[in-house]
Image: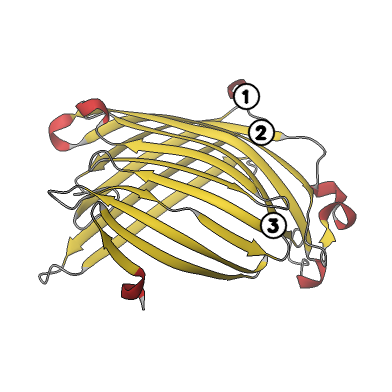
Amino acid sequence: IVRLMIHETPAGMFIGLPIVDTNPNKGTTYGFMPILVGQKETTKRITRIFAPSLTYNPTFKMEPTMRAYFYPTEKATYFARGAWSGNANKDLIGEMEDFDFMGKDISVGARLAFDIDGTKRFHGVGPDSGELQETNFLRKTFGYTARVGLPIFKDIGVKFNVAHRLAGEKITDGVIPNLTNIRTRFPQHAPNRFHQDAEIQFFLDYDTRDSAMTTSKGFYAKGYMGNSQRAFASEYTFQRYGADLRWFQPWPNGKWTTALRYRYDQLLGEAPF
């Protein structure tokens, strides 16, 4: 069936996908997504993807969405998305990641996002919370993330990275008609203003993967520490420490890859998550 949806074009391919989403938080959504894939003529490497969609949901009504992906090199990804529903849900996102920025072996990443999501649920805090206490709330968020990684041992792929994240969030009453609003049942958990948190993070990473996007072989290791303080424009004070290890080994047949991952995180202090 999938093969019948794929059609070759002079610049790549066209894929017509129907959408049927039975998400329990917002009900059934129907729609259609035409996908245009652009490929480099000589190598057939994908260089761009355009994926607009039009969906309908009984609660959130008609929602047009536009997605665009660009892959100027094998180590760079650029992404943009915009969505605007007839009832509450909206988002605007821009994101980029380049592991060889300007050909200097410098890693650069950035993300800017605005999001309104009316599908969220809250059941209370602690072991006494249950399904009968279910409420609906709408969450508004706005924030950014920025990262720069500089090579310190270029021949072996070790980089020192600095990242900063800032996010603001506000919770208001939801829009799902058959659920109680959060302010009615849990007014203490529905503040009237935006709250914000910010974090600066330092980490070392080591990367021998053949590709960060479509990995088939290699090893990745990361050790990091993060700090959030009021001096960094955060309402919360906390520290984070952790490690991330990933290993990829292709099979002899060339069709399969075994992937293993270990991740450790430790959080100290008061965090909004």
Asked whether the viewer can see residue 179, the reply is yes
Query: Which residue is located at x 56 percent, y 65 percent?
Result: 31
Residue receiving disc 3: 120
Query: Which residue is located at x 44 percent, y 67 percent?
Result: 17
Q: Closest to the observer: 143 or 243?
A: 143
Query: Which residue is located at x 32 percent, y 67 percent?
Result: 6
Asked whether the viewer can see residue 236, the reply is no
* Residue at far bottom of view: 1
Residue 169 sits above or below residue 119 on the image: above
Q: Closest to the observer: 60 or 264?
A: 60
Residue 8 disc label: none
Mark 2 or mark 3: which comes first in sequence? 3
Q: Are marks 2 and 1 in contact (CB under 8 Å)?
A: yes
Give the CA distance from mark 2 to mark 3.
Answer: 19 Å
Secondary structure at numbered mark 3: strand
Q: Is residue 260 left or right of residue 56?
A: left
Secondary structure at numbered mark 1: loop
Residue 153 sits above or below residue 77 on the image: above
> Which three-letter amino acid code belongs to the residue tagged 1?
Ala
Nearer the observer: mark 2 or 3; the answer is 3
Q: Is residue 249 left or right of residue 229?
A: left
Nearer the observer: mark 3 or 1; the answer is 3
> Which three-letter amino acid code belongs to the residue tagged 3?
Lys
Residue 233 disc label: 1
Residue receiving disc 2: 196
* Residue at far top of view: 231
Tell me which corner region of the image, top left, top right, bottom left or bottom right, holds residue 29.
Answer: bottom right
Residue 172 sits above or below residue 60 on the image: above
- Percent across and percent down for residue 137 are 76, 54
Secondary structure at numbered mark 2: strand
Q: Is residue 245 left or right of residue 167?
A: left
Q: Are marks 3 and 1 in contact (CB under 8 Å)?
A: no
